[in-house]
Amino acid sequence: MKPLDKIKTIIGQLKKVTESESLAIGKRAFDQVASLTAQKESLLAEFDEAAQAMEASELSEQIIQELEFVRLKAEENAAILKATAQGVREARSRLKKIREAELNTGAYGRGGGALRNPDASTIVAKA
C-alpha cells in the first residue's frame, strides 16, 4: 500500500476510534475508553511511520483538515475526561467530609439505644 493510501486509512480509523471514545465517555464506560486509547496510540505510531515515508508535498489540504478534525476530537475527549475525573475527586471529597461530620456528631443508632460515636459531642438537657 502506498504511504498516502495508508495515511488516509489510518486517519479514517482514528476518526472512528475518537468517535467511539466520545460515545464511551458519554456512557461512562471507562473500561472501553482505556482500550480505545491503546488503539489510538497504535494508530498514531503507524501514522508516524507512514508519514516519515512521505514527502511533505504529498499531504493534501484535505488530509491535513481530516487530521485536524481527529486532533480536535481527541482534545475534546481529553477535556471531558479531565472534567469527569475532577468531578469524581470533588464528589469523593464531599462524601468524606459528610462522613467525617457524621462520625463527629453524637447521633443515636437506628434503634435509638446507643450513640454511634460515644466520644462525639452531645447536648444534654439539664432539668
Image: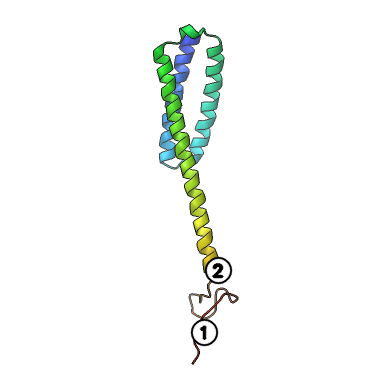
Q: Earlier in the sequence, mark 2 or mark 1?
A: 2
**Is 109 in front, or is 54?**
54
Separation of disc 2 and disc 1 at Cα?
18 Å
Which residue type carries mark 1? Val
- Residue 1 appears in the picture as rendered: no
Give how far across and how far down residue 67 sits, in percent.
44, 20
Rate crowding at label 2 as few (under 14), some (14 to 19) or many (20 or more) other CA atoms within 10 Å.
some
Q: Secondary structure at mark 1?
A: loop
Q: Is residue 82 left or right of residue 66?
A: right
Residue under the point 53% across and 72% down: 105
- Residue 101 appears in the picture as rendered: yes
In this rendering, the count of numbered labels is 2
Give how far across and how far down residue 100 sits, in percent.
55, 64
Give how far across and how far down residue 59 sits, in percent.
45, 10
Q: How is the image coloured?
A: rainbow
* Residue 32 to residue 14: above or below: below
Which residue type carries mark 2? Leu
Q: Secondary structure at mark 2?
A: helix
The residue that disc 1 covers is 124
Q: Is residue 38 left or right of residue 65?
A: right
Give how far across and how far down residue 54 sits, in percent.
52, 8
